[in-house]
């Protein structure tokens, strides 16, 4: 199915454990993004990627690592999870602005992560 | 830091009424977008308005943009219970270079009562 998928949808882990959240898109969009959504803070950008092997920090990158070896995948890893990383994580993708189609972002369904 | 800030934070109306949400931002933009988020779901793009546009329509949605005041409004006419959701504005920033990276506001939670 075309679209953007995230896995797992729900995850409970313990402090100190490594967790990887997966994101896969089928549109071949060049840009991909990771956000976290918390009450009172709205949506905040963690990392983004302009293309395979090109990534950059967003507003709240500390404690997170990303990679993008293939255009369609953009995994987010919490190297040593902390309770403050309990949140809902959204992956998104978009075309570059110069493509003339605008830069609307397409979002996945989210992963609800709880760190105990 | 937040670029866009929505107002009000929450809005409750009756079905059939119009709903107006506002967004203010701080720096020069290329475009401003509105998204909707139903409870427990991802965000869905509604409409994009470019900095050289003043008004745009899409179905029951009307968006205005006033770059001199750095503000935008989203009007939903003849609201339905299915419009119940949170609405976010998102802006890029000319100063940050490139328009792909967006900054989202905290959202307006709209409740439409049947």
Image (cartoon, coloured by chain):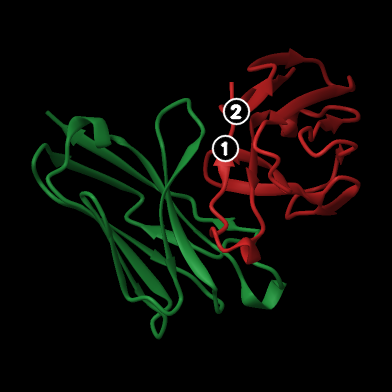
Query: Number of callouts in the render?
Result: 2
- Placement of B105 over or under A6, stated as above or below: below
Camera-near label (2 vs 1) is 1
Residue at position x 64%, y 31% in the image: A87
Q: Which chain is red?
A: A
* Residue A113 pos. (x, y %): 68, 22
Question: In screen coordinates, is B17 left or right of A5?
Answer: left
The numbered disc on residue A110 is: 2
Chain where mark 1 sits: A
Q: State the image coordinates of residue A116 (x, y, percent, origin top left).
A: 74, 17
Is B80 placed above or below B87 here? above
Which chain is assigned green? B
Q: Which chain carries label 2?
A: A
Relative horizontal placement of residue A102, taking residue B53 as reference (left or right) = right
The residue sitting at 41% across, 28% down in the picture is B39
- The x and y percentages for residue B13 are 15, 42
Q: Residue A107 carries which label?
A: 1
Helix, strand or loop for disc 2: loop
Considering every residue shown, the one lying at the far left of the view is B16
Relative to B107, is B94 above or below? below
Quick one: label 1, few (<14), some, or many (20+) residues within 10 Å? many
Q: Residue furthest bottom?
A: B68
Q: In the figure, residue A80 lies in which quadrant? A: top right
């Amino acid at each position: 199915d075309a679209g953007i998928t995230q896995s797992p949808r729900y995850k409970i882990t313990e402090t100190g454990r490594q967790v990887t959240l997966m994101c896969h898109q089928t549109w071949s969009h060049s840009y991909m993004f990771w956000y976290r959504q918390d009450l009172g803070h709205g949506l905040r950008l963690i990392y983004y990627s302009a293309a395979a092997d090109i990534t950059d920090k967003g507003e709240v990158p500390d404690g997170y690592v990303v990679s993008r070896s293939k255009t369609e995948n953009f995994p987010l890893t919490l190297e040593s999870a902390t309770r403050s990383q309990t949140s809902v994580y959204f992956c998104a993708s978009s075309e570059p602005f110069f493509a003339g189609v605008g830069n609307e972002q397409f979002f996945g369904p989210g992963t609800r992560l709880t760190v105990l | 830091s937040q670029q866009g800030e929505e107002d009000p934070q929450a809005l409750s109306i009756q079905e059939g009424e119009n709903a107006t949400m506002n967004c203010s931002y701080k720096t020069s933009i290329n475009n401003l977008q509105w998204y909707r988020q139903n409870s427990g779901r991802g965000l869905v793009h509604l409409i994009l308005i470019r900095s050289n546009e003043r008004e745009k329509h899409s179905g029951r949605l009307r968006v205005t943009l006033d770059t001199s005041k750095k503000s935008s409004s989203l009007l939903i006419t003849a609201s339905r219970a299915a419009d119940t959701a949170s609405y976010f504005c998102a802006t890029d920033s000319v100063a940050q270079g490139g328009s792909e990276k967006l900054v989202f506001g905290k959202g307006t939670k709209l409740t439409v009562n049947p």
